[in-house]
Amino acid sequence: MSQTTFEEMSVSDFFYRNRDIAGLTNPSRSIFVAIREVVENSLDAAESQKIPPDVYVRLSFESEATKETQIYKLRVQDNGCGIQPRFIPSAFGQVLYGSKYKLKQARGTFGLGGKMAVLYGQITTHKPVLVTSSTGQEKIYSFKLMIDIQRNKPVILDRKVITNKDGWRGTVIEFTLEGDYLRAMPKIIEYFKQTAMVNPYANITFVDPKGRLYKFTRATTIMPDPPTETLPHPYGVDVELLQRLIQVTTCMNMSTFLRQHFHRVGEITAQKFLDFAEIPISKNPKKLSHEEIVKLMQNLKKYKDFLPPDANCLSPLGEDLLKAGVTKELNPEYLVVHQRKPSTYAGHPFIVEMAIAYGGGVPKTGGFVIYRFANKIPLLYDEASDVSYKVISSMNWRRYKVAPDMPIAIVIHVCSTKVPYKTVGKEFISDRIEVRKEEANAIREVSRQLSHFLTRQEHVHMEKKRLGIFSKYLPRIAEFSTTLSGQNRQPDIDKLLKSVQKYGTEES
Amino acid sequence: MEQKKAKITARKQEVLKELKNFGTSIYNQLDQGLFPSVNMPSRSTENITYDEQLRQYILGEKSVGRSTRNIRHIKPFTQLAWVALFSNELTSQRKTSTLRDVYYSAQAYEMTFSDQQESNNIITDLETLTGFAREDFSIFPEERSAIFGDIEVAYTVPGYEGKSVNLTSHPDGVLIGPAITSSEFLKTSADKIIAIEKGALFTRFIEESVHSKHKSLLISCGGQAPRQTRSFIRRLHDELDLPVFILTDGDPWGMHIAQVIISGSANAAHLRDLNTPDAVWSGVWASDIIEYKLPTDPLDEVDIKRLYELQKDPRYQNDPIWQREIKTFLKIRRKTELEAFSRYGLTYIVDKYLPTKLEAGPDVSTKRAKKKS
C-alpha cells in the first residue's frame, strides 16, 4: 500500500476510526480537547499578526445525549487575522489542510487539531459547522459546512456574504458536539488558567454551560515577535519529505535543490555535502531513484558539517512575558525566570524557558506544582511521563534549601518547530537527551536564584525572631530587676532595643 | 540557744541582701544602657574538684558568663532574674515553695519553663551565683525524709514562732520539711544520730525504742538523702555536737548513700555545709556479710560496674575502709540488705548488731583500718 493512495483514500476516515490518537478518547477528554484545539487556533491567528488576542469561548447546553453525556454548542470567537473566503471550506472541512503545514513554531503541528474537533462534532451530532470570518476587508463571509469523511472534502451547505461596516476582523466558529462537561470542567478551567499564564497578552473569556463567567484579562500588550518560516534543516528530513520536495521542485540540479529547499545550506556546504554523499552536483533531483533518495536521506543525517538551525523560526515567550504571565496568575512572593539559548535535537531547534515561583498565590499541595507548556500550550495530562518530571525529581533539592512542603511552582516552556511529543495526543514531551539537558540546566539556574532568596528569607526570619526575643525578654528583665532592687522607676531600655535592631540589620 | 536563733535570722538577712544585690546589679547595668550580664563559677565536670581539706567537692576557678546580649543567654537570664525575684518574695514574706511549685508559679508571670528540669537548673544557677542553697531561698524539693527522737525544737515559721515541740511526739516520725529545718534546737537527751537508708527499718527502730535505748535521734533518709536532710544532719552534728552513724544496705548503692552524707555530691559542689565529713558509715559492710553470715544475693553486672567506678572516686580514697569494703564486695561477689538480719529474729539488729557498731564509735573505720594494717 503506497503512502499516496492511503492519503487519497481518506485521511478523515483514518482519523475518524482512530480518533484516540488525537486525544479524543472519551466524552470528558474529547470536550476538553475540542475546546483546546479551537482556542489554540484562535490564539495562533491573532499572534501571527502580532495582535493581542481577544478570545471569547462559550459552551452552551443543547440537549441530553446519553446518561453521562450531553450535546453542547461550542462557539469560539477571535480577533485574529481572519481567513480568506476561498480557504475557509478547506481550512475547516478537510483534515490535514492548513496554514501550519510549514516549518515554524505554532501551537498545532499537523493542521489536525481544529479540524479533528469539527470532525468529532460532526460524527457525534451530525450537525454542520458554522464559520464566519473576515480579514478586515469590506466583506464578512459565512459558511455552513460539513466534512465528507470518505473523501476528505468539505461540503458547503450554505454561504453568506455581508458587508463589513465596522471593519471587523477575526473568525467565529460554532459547532455542536457531544461531551461530559461536568467531568471535564476542572481540566478545562485549569487549561484556561494556564493558557492565560503563558499568554499574558491575551484576553480570554469563557462562559460555561451553567452561565458562569471566567475572565482572564491581559496584563500586557507587549507580544513576542512572531516566528518566521524556515526551510527544513537537513538533519530533520525523512524520505517522505524528500519525495514531496522532489515532486514540487523546479530545480534542475542537486546543488540548487539543496540550497533552495534546506535550511542553512549555501553553495559551499552543498558542494561539500554532495562530495561526501558521492552525488554529482549536476544530477537532476527528479531523476533520483527510490534507493538513491533513501541513501540521500541517510547521508543528510550522517554529514557532520551542516550549520545548526537558527532559532528565528521560534517564538519563545521571553523572560519578561513569562514573568508577567506567572505573576498575573499566581502572584507569587518570589519569582525567577530564565530562558536558555536555542539548542537543537535531530535538526529541530528548540528553546527551554523556565520559571520557579515561591509563596504568595502558589497553591500549597505538599509537593511542587508543575506547569508544563509546549509552544504555549498547557500540557495537563501524564505529568509523570514528561521529561521535566524526571528532571525535577532527579534534582538534589536540599542543596538548594528547598523542602518538599514549600509552596513552589515550576513553569516549563519548551518551544520548537517540532515539539518532541511522545504521542499524537500531545500531552507530554519525550525524554530526548538534548531536551533533558536544557531543562536540567534551566532548572538549576532558577533554583540557584531561589536558594539565594530562601537563604535571604531565612536570615530575615531569623533576624525577626532574634529581635522578637530581645523585645520579649529585655522588658521583663527590667521589670524584675526594678522590683528586686527596690527601685521605683524602671530603667530605660529603648536604647538597648534599638541597638539590637541596628546590630541586626548590619548582620543580615 | 538565743545565739542560734540570731544565726538563722541573720542568714535570712544575708540571703535577702544577696538577692537584692543581684537585682541592683542588673538594674544598674540596664540604667547605664548596658546589656546586663553575670558571672558565676562553672559547674562543668572539669571545674569540679575534690577538696581534701573541706572533705567535699568544690568548684574550681573557672567561671561562666551570661550576657543578655547573647540571644541564647537572654531567656535563661530572664528566668534567673525571675527566680531571684520569686525567691525574694518567698523569703521576705516567710513563705515556702517547692521545686514543682516554682515551675508552675512561673506561668503566672508569663515566665514559662519548658519543663521542670529547666526550672530546677535555673534554681541551681541561683545557688551557684549566690552561694546559698535553694532551701535558703525557701524553695524545697518534694521528697521528704523523717526524724524521730528526743529533741525539743522551736519553730521559726510564721504562725508557729516560738512554739516548741518534742520530736518523739509522733510515732511515725516527723517530716523533715521547711518547718523543722528552720527550727531552733532547744534541748535533747540524745548523744548520737543514726541515719537509716530505709523507712521500714526506721519504723522498726522506733518500735524497738532504739531512740531511748541508745539515746539517739533517728533519721530516715528514704534512699538517697535529700539535700535538706543532709544539711539538717550537718546542723544537728554541728550545733549539738552529736556523732552521726549511717546504716545502709550492704551493696555499692547503700555504700554511696552513706558517702554522699559524708562527702557530698558533685552536683552540689557549688554549695557548702550539705555534708557531714565526720559522719561514719557503720554498715552493712561487705565484711559484715562474712562475719554475720548474712543471707545474700549475687552482685549483678551494674553493681560490679558501680563498684569499679567508686573505687576510682576521690571520695573513696581518704579512708581505707572504703577501698577495703569495695575489694571485699568484689571478692565475695555478694550483696545484702539491712533486713537480712531478720534471719536471727526481729530484734537481733537492734539488740546485737547495732550495739556492736555503735560501740566501735566514731573512729570505727580508722580503728579497724589500723587493726588490719
Image (cartoon, coloured by chain):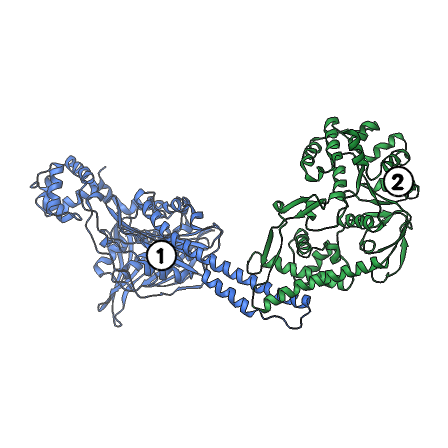
Chain colours: A blue, B green
Residue A198 in sight: yes
Residue B85 lies in quadrant: bottom right
What subunit carries mark 2? B
- Residue B175 placement (x, y as % from top left): 83, 50
Secondary structure type for disc 1: strand
> Is there one chain holding both mark 1 and mark 2?
no
Q: At numbered mark 2, what does the secondary structure look like: helix, strand or loop?
A: helix
> Residue B106 sits in which quadrant?
bottom right
Q: For this rendering, which residue is in front, B279 or A362?
A: B279
Q: Check the residue under mark 1 and report the chain it is in.
A: A
**Looking at this view, is A289 or A386 the one in front?**
A386
Q: What residue appears at the point 76 percent right and 64 percent down from the top-left corner?
A: B92
Q: Depth check: B241 or A436 in front?
A: B241
Disc assigned to residue A9? none
Looking at the rendered structure, the kind of residue marked 2 is: Arg
Question: Tag 2: Cα neighbours inside 10 Å, few (<14), some, or many (≥20)?
Answer: some
- Within 10 Å of disc 1 (Cα), the crowding (few <14, some 14-19, many 20+) is many
- Quadrant of the rendering where the N terminus of chain A is positioned: top left
Task: From this view, report whether residue A345 is shown above or below residue A360.
Answer: above
Q: Is residue A396 above or below residue B74?
A: above
**Marks 1 and 2, how far apart at CA:** 85 Å
**What is the quadrant of the C terminus of chain A in the image?**
bottom left
The residue where tag 1 is placed is: A337
Residue A137 placement: quadrant: bottom left
Give the residue type at disc 1: Val
Horizontal side of A6 relative to B361 (left or right) equals: left
Which residue is under mark 2?
B204
Residue A463 screen position, x and y as percent: 50, 60
Total marks placed: 2
